[in-house]
Image: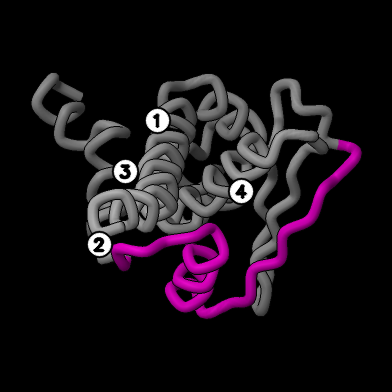
Amino acid sequence: MDGTASAKYSPARCAAAGFLALNLPSRLSLERLISIVETLRHRRIEVDVSESLNGGSVCGLWLSTDSTEIILHAPTPSALHRQQFILHELGHMVLRHDELVVSSNYAETLFPNLSGEKVSRILGRSDFLDHIEAAAETLADLFAAAIRDSSLEPRSFERIFG
């Protein structure tokens, strides 16, 4: 991929496009964002803490079923960390990263001389997954800023208009 193509599909551009496509309201909370993503995905979203996630290399996990999106996150005493874990997984949903995953059966048809498992391992060590994670985290940061700006609005209004 040349420099122009990689800039066109950069994680920042993907995240910005996903954020703008949502046309979010000026007042946004985590709960409202979850509701918006539920509508987008046509599935209920459940969020729960998972003691098996240690908060080290994996802080959150997104599982998708036919009727439910499940977000599991590492235990944390920080509400901001919890929110960021959730926003990151919502970023994957909005960017439809589940549609980018290549199954091992399909990978075998693309690369008939390699096992599907080997192809998955190769893709896992490539920039492909790094770009996916960077796009989801960048979108999570955009969501966090929108939520933070929404929470500041009433205080600013009150400060100006008393």
Q: What's under tag 2, amino acid-wise?
A: Ala
Of the numbered discs 4 and 3, the one sitting upstream in the chain is 3
Q: Dot 3 surroundings within 10 Å: few (below 14), some, or many (20 or more)?
A: many
Of the numbered discs 2 and 3, the one sitting upstream in the chain is 3
Q: What residue sits right under mark 3 in the picture? A: 15
Q: What residue sits right under mark 1 in the picture? A: 131
Mark 3 element type:
helix
Q: Position of residue 44 (x, y in %)?
A: 63, 76
Magenta region, residue range: 25-52
Q: CA distance from mark 4 to mark 3?
A: 16 Å
Tell whether label 3 touches label 4 (CB within 8 Å): no
- Identity of the residue furthest to the right in this view: 51
Which picture quadrant has residue 54? Answer: top right
Q: Is residue 90 visible?
A: yes
Residue at x-position 9% and y-position 26%: 4
Q: Is residue 95 visible?
A: no
The label on residue 86 is: 4
Describe residue 46's horizontal placement relative to residue 93 as left or right.
right
Tell whether label 1 touches label 2 (CB within 8 Å): no
| Mark nearer the viewer, 3 or 1 | 3
Q: CA distance from mark 2 to mark 1?
A: 19 Å
Residue at x-position 74% and y-position 21%: 56
Point out the image quarter for the C terminus: bottom left
162 or 95, which lies in front? 162
Q: What's under tag 3, amino acid-wise?
A: Ala
Q: What's under tag 4, amino acid-wise?
A: Ile
Q: What residue sits right under mark 2 in the picture? A: 21
Q: Position of residue 14 (x, y in %)?
A: 28, 43
In the rendered view, would you say 65 is above or below 84? below
The label on residue 23 is: none
Of the numbered discs 2 and 1, the one sitting upstream in the chain is 2
